[in-house]
Image (tube, helix red, strand yellow):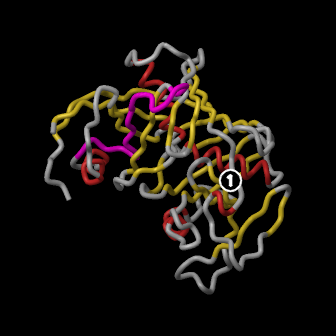
Amino acid sequence: MHIRFTKMQGAGNDFVVLDETQGRLGLTPAQYRFLADRHFGVGADQILTVRPSPAEGIDFEYVIHNADGGEVQQCGNGARCFARFVRDKGLTDKDTIRVQTRGGVIAPRLTPDGRVTVDMGRPRFEPAEVPFDASGLAPVPQGSGQKWPLALAGQAQAAPVLVAIASMGNPHAVQIVDDVDTAPVLQTGPLIESHPRFPERVNAGFLQIVNRAHVRLRVFERGVGETLACGSGACAAVACGIRLGLLDNEVLLDARGGQLTIAWSGQSADSVFMTGPATTVFEGQIDIPQDLL
């Protein structure tokens, strides 16, 4: 199968973008894995697919596959690239679009400075909405939020890690660390990602508070591993930090791949807004084998 693609990145979180507005490609999970493979395919953290409007009042459908071939609900950095792609390709002339994802409807907006702001929807903190199995656990209250003790496999002698949980249409577990550079992201990230208390697995965030308006973040993403940036993870981390009483309502966030601005009122009914870059890297064509397993 011969297909065209666009390679994009947002704060270092990189994507292969596919246009299915004229028809479905019908790719299998193995073929998505091939595209994401940095040695044999194009290379990407996620594969983003643009599909036509699925309903009245919606401009496009936005489908996300992780590097492991699994479909997921949300990708915030990808949403910014999605908006830039449909505008640059002439698929819309709107500055603000409404996009259907598996995690709900989002509304990316192109700003005059070339960045993209995304209304990421409201954060959800109830365990059942994440989802998170809180049975038998006693949360530790802080501010208007709480942290949950999480015992990690193979670390029975160590104290449980305390995580704040949130859903931005996909699940996140955020822990506060003194320094993201020395945090055990690659050691404990996989243990949190696949922890049995998260039935859909989880994105593991490691959040360093620089001051009330400035944070640093690393994220071990489910189905991907650590990435240079995670937009939904940034939103979840800042929302958790605000709930815990640690952050102001607008925060500059340093990811390893660049800076994002995250804003949330702290009110449960209000959306989180994320602003950051979205850049086309190159365009190309590739032959995808049909017999991949």
Q: Is residue 218 left or right of residue 261?
A: left
Q: Residues within 10 Å of mark 1 (few under 14, many from 20)?
A: many
Q: Which residue is mark 1?
A: 208
| Quadrant assignment, res 224 | bottom left
Is residue 46 highlighted in magenta? Answer: yes
- Tell me residue 239's x, y (percent): 72, 47
Q: Which residue range is magenta in the image?
A: 41-58
Q: Residue pushed farthest bottom? A: 157
Q: Quadrant of residue 48?
A: top left
Instruction: Check disc 1 and give the amino acid type.
Output: Gln
User: Looking at the image, which residue is at 45% across and 34% down?
Assistant: 61
| Whether residue 275 is visible | yes
Across and down, in percent, residue 170 comes to 56, 51
Near-viewer residue (110 or 100): 100
Compared to residue 15, the image places residue 31 above or below, namely below
Task: Note whether residue 177 is visible.
Answer: no
Residue at 72% x, 42% y: name it.
Answer: 214
Residue at the image point whose x is 64% and y is 81% from the top: 158
Depth order, front residue of 291/163: 291
Q: Is residue 55 above or below residue 174?
A: above
Q: Secondary structure at mark 1?
A: strand
Instruction: Point out residue 143 in the picture as x, y percentages from the top left corner.
Output: 85, 56
Characterize the magenta stretch by its predominant secondary structure: loop
